[in-house]
Image (cartoon, rainbow, N blue to C red):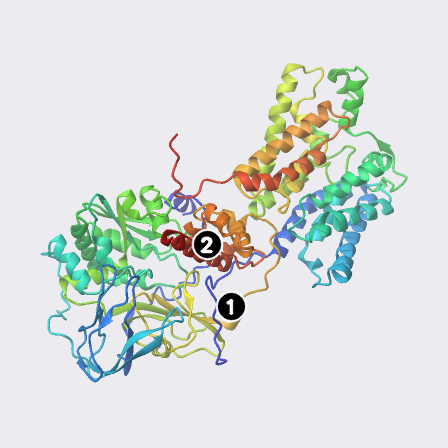
Amino acid sequence: MSNLLNVSPSPHAHGKETTQKLMFGVVAALLPALFTSIFYFGWGAIIVTATSVFSCLIFEYLIQRFIFRKPITITDGSALVTGMLLAFNVPSNLPVFIIVIGSFVSIAIAKMTFGGLGNNPFNPALVGRVFMLISFPVQMTSWPVPAGFGTGYIDAVTGATPLAIIKEGLKNGESISQLVTQIPSPAQMFLGDMGGSMGEVAAVALLIGFVWLLYKKIITWHIPVSVIGSIVIFTTILWLVNPEKNANPMFHVLAGGVLLGAIFMATDYVTSPMTPKSMIIYGCGIGILTVIIRVWGAYPEGVSFAILIMNAFVPLMNLYIKPRRFGEEVKNG
Amino acid sequence: MLLKNLALKTFPIGGVHPPENKLTSESEIQYLPIPVSVAIPVSQHIGAPASVIVNKDEKVKTGQVIAQSKGFVSANIHSSVSGKVSKIDTVIDTSGYKQTAVFITVEGDEWIETIDRGNEILTDINSSSEEIIKKCLESGIVGMGGATFPSHVKLTVPAGKKCDILIINGVECEPYLTSDHRLMLERGEEVLIGISIMMIALKVSRAMIGIENNKPDAVAHMTKLATAFQGITVHALKVKYPQGAEKQLIKALINREVPSGRLPLDVNTVVHNVGTAFAVYEAIQKNKPLFERVVTITGKSVSKPGNYFVRLGTPVKDLIAAAGGIPEDTGKIVSGGPMMGKALSSTDIPVVKGTSGIILFPSGESVRMESMPCIRCTKCTQACALNLEPYLLMTLSEKGLFERAQKERITDCMECGSCSYICPARRPLLDYIRLGKSTVIKMAREWVVK
């Protein structure tokens, strides 16, 4: 033994959890969706994911190395998660240069300008996604039709997403019962056999990821359940009021980015609230905004916008919505 | 088994489950040989230090008062050995501060005559409430769980308050420590008599013993013994740290919530440790003041970990020697449990009334990992048993925003360490919260003075 003893304040024990383990836990939870994506979209999915992950890591490295001049922490897994989520939020035929621009916006603008990991107010992957959607609307909304490994990359056959079909159809005065023949069956949607962003299509794969995240205690149920729950409640009301003008709740949950958003994007640690009560309010806000954008907005899909809008409220919620402390006396009157 | 565990009582909010590492739960309590000399600090309790009443070169006997309590919240200090006072000097205590201590060179082991040294267990209690409280005061009994609050104070129900139940803490939720566990197994009957004595002092008819379910033998043993005692029941609790915290234990057992900044008496209850119950038994039935206690000496690399009755004032190094000496890889020595214990700066530090265990950590577990940015994962807010927001309290303390920290109830923090334990970014949450808490308390005092 050395003659010197370490002296430090308690606790003297530490749990096994690390930032890196949590991040890689999220990566593991994303793998089922990645595999189904590759299964449906072939090489496109691989190229898009690889480009996105690689460029996110490179941008983070370059900024830490040459601008921050601090220790490089790209191995903590956070840029990897951002890269994967960014890829999951775009069509699988997106040209490489657009993905690189999106990655730059995600990492350099949405994350590093605020000081890096832990400081960004908005979900980096979604900022990148929305930037691309606004800058490259054509490329960002041409969705390859799933055709397995036969699906080409840039030359993939494209089609509309179920949400776009409904939106366009309703605008043209058609009713839901007329449109229902044009959209995939609930079973197809559950398994992911439809057009859409590469990571959002397969509900079953995303739900497997959800179970994994809960099992590993990486996230709690509060945000995903309140997002999905509020969407179900809101769309059920609309559907009951007028089933010819409004799609049923199951369609709303399975189509588009609701599951990806609720399970993986809204639960992003840094940009979501800190206490259960706030989490539920935040989740319900996302759900309600999503439905409003989908039903009355210009875009067929609104999950990304809804999450970003609610991100902006998180600091306020953390400031004003407080849990009941143990032993806090109930105020009388 | 799993279902049974789910059905067990526990406190509802927060908590963590550190690896238990109870290496010494099978080791019978042995008597540590009397050291050649002891250093007995005059402040081994919360409250005013006792004042020394012996002089240099004076002969003292085992059990003799050597420092008299000063004021209501204070406790007598007794000699733990017989011999000659070699000096009255300062000693480094568990917290690393210098304080006055009586140094005694041991000569034989002559006890004061009033102590009953027989092995017979005395079941009949012939003392009144007042006599018990007076005897506890004289015998220097303090809370043996580690808080060392003078017991006579906690056994006195002030006018205007009432107490309807006594809760006995046999939880021992800290990893590694087994002193209470062994005491319940080996001195269960004495502990129960001690509890009955405290019930008389408090004038209550009911007592509940809470024991975590990682000690099924203690639960079974105490349940069996308790059938012979009026009003005492034993309750197995789900294993969760910090269940041994007074407020959490009360919540778990009787679902009463002690208001913030108040005491258990405000919900008509008093909590004592099983070690204290044993000390009370010895004081009342055997006339034996508090001068020895059970200490666990343990650690993953320690060759002979065990539980010992140790005379107070014995240097920690004697205890380590009995456990096979300091392992080669030792990097840190902790007095108490790994979650709330204090790291010792030297092995000359004496064992005191609050020393429940000595843990030797290998160097690999002694150094903190580098901390990373907070990723707001909410693990600390989930772990906090008081529903505070440790991440926020840390930031507020770091930035010097103490008034806001006070509004966020930083002073409620009991420093259990669950937040620092769970933090995946290894942030020193509790260090900063302690800083904020002490600053806020100081500010409040200054405000009162003004």
Name the residue carrying label 1: B365
Q: Amino acid at mark 1?
A: Glu
Q: Is residue A242 above or below residue A22?
A: above
Q: Is residue B45 above or below residue B302?
A: above
Residue B184 visible, this angle: no
Q: Is residue B394 above or below residue A227?
A: below
x 49%, y 60%: residue: B431
Nearer to the camera, B395 or A191: B395
In this rendering, the count of numbered labels is 2
- Residue A231: % across, % down: 63, 28
- Residue B209: % across, % down: 28, 51
Q: Does label 1 or label 2 sit earlier along the sequence? A: 2
Residue A66 visible, this angle: yes
Label 1 close to label 2 by CB (< 8 Å)? no
Query: What subunit carries mark 1?
Result: B
Check disc 1 and report its element: helix, strand or loop.
helix
Quadrant position of residue B33:
bottom left
Tag 1: Cα neighbours inside 10 Å, few (<14), some, or many (≥20)? some
Q: Are marks 1 and 2 on the same chain?
A: yes
Query: What subunit carries mark 2?
Result: B
Check disc 2 and report its element: helix, strand or loop.
loop
Name the residue carrying label 2: B17
Left or right of B53: which side holds B444?
A: right
Tag 2: Cα neighbours inside 10 Å, few (<14), some, or many (≥20)? some
Q: Amino acid at mark 2?
A: His
- Residue B123: % across, % down: 13, 58
